[in-house]
Image (spheres, rainbow, N blue to C red):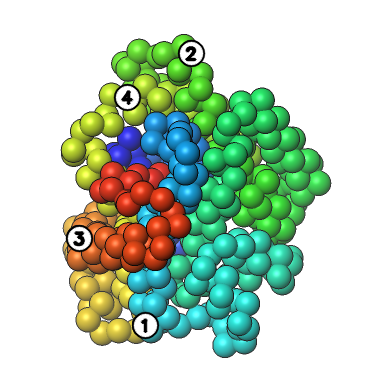
Amino acid sequence: MGAIRLFLALAVLQSHIRSHIFEPQNIHLGNKLALGVNGGYAVMFFFVISGFIMSYVLDDRYNRPGGTLSFYKARIIRIYPLWWICWIVAVILFGFGSKQLGLLDFATSFLLIGSDLISSFWLYPAPHTELYPIGLGLAWSLATELTFYAIAPFLLRSNVACIILLVASGLWREAVNMKFPLETTDVNIWNAWCYYFFPATVLFFMLGHLSRELYKRLPMPRWMGFAGIGVAALICFIQDATYNFENVNFYFAIILFSVSLPAVFAATKDSRLFNLLGDLSYPLYLTHGLLLIALTGPWAPFKQIMDAIIAASLSMGSGMWTRGVIIMGCVVVLALGVSVVTRFALEIPATRAMAWLMDHCGGIFGRRASVATIAESAVPG
């Protein structure tokens, strides 16, 4: 599971490398370097994982008196310390995309809750992504995660309610696609109603939860789970996200991924290596945008690094694939290095500090946070 989460974070990185580096260099490789998974697909796969993991921990660790408050405490400890560090760093180094921001913009950006709705509808149909610091525009997905966390302890108690919500969300997406087809509609309008809008994405969280419920009743052999993930990856690789977001290939792949996930989780949940890889996914998700802004910005040390990478790609040949692989490989190594440093130098101390602080603030959240509680999460997404 951890390796899948890290791969999805790398797929998001790949999409941003395309827009920040490849396109200015006239390099067009599609999404093949991420097995056909673009950033948008990766976020929805993350939501499936989040639905599955939250279903698991609510049943396994928080199914007791006071468990709901302890669950909320764990989510706060998991999301906010690193987010606030990245937010402050981004504001200091890069600032915001607009100087005309109000208190509501800063508050929702810093606290995340509701920021996905404001970024979609405050200036509708134009997006209002300027409320996030430069380099952290992907934070809307964290706001969506927090919305799901808020309702999960109550919603996931009823499979009937989850099925109804899954169907309703699917029907909403179909209605949006009929009203605003991507082929003829401003993509900002479609994004507002079908990509950033929680009622349109809750479908994917429900897929994760219901796949676990299905696995409890009809366990899948572990080899079949890995095979299912492989076929889902093959489908994404063949179609390479060349169709619009809403297509049969994408839905077939993500449903197959969902059904296969519990068996893969059962086979890998106790692996130290896979868990370590998964722990790097959140720092990578949050810091890679800042790294790309630094590499492609005016700062001489970072610009020199990027210039050296581009020069190395040209010296190895003029073919797009050669250049793309070299640039992608170098930036991925840099991004992973930043993620490792961030994880051990910033995220772990910050989460421990917040856990200590919350444990000494009246005990409103119940039992103290264990290391497992702090680590559990499907973030990013």
Q: Residue at x 43, y 38 (%)?
A: 62
Q: Nearer the viewer, residue 107 or 185?
A: 107
For the residues labelled 3 and 1, say whether their Cβ atoms are less than 8 Å apart: no
Q: Which dot marks residue 344?
A: 3
Q: Nearer the viewer, residue 145 or 303?
A: 145
Helix, strand or loop under label 2: helix
Q: Amino acid at mark 1?
A: Leu
256 vs 330: above or below? above
Q: Amino acid at mark 4?
A: Ala
Q: Gap between marks 4 and 2, in whole Å?
A: 14 Å
Q: Amino acid at mark 2?
A: Arg
Residue highlighted by disc 4: 266
Which is closer to the viewer, label 4 or label 1? 4
Residue highlighted by disc 1: 93
Work out whether mark 4 precedes mark 2 in sequence or the reverse, and give the earlier one: 2
Helix, strand or loop under label 3: helix
Work out whether mark 3 precedes mark 2 in sequence or the reverse, and give the earlier one: 2
Horizontally, residue 56 falls left or right of residue 178, namely left
> Could you tell me if residue 285 is visible in this image?
no
Q: Residue at x 50, y 80 (%)?
A: 96
Horizontally, residue 350 falls left or right of residue 219, namely left
Q: Gap between marks 2 and 1, in whole Å?
A: 51 Å
Where in the figure is residue 255, as x and y percent of width and height?
Answer: 53, 27
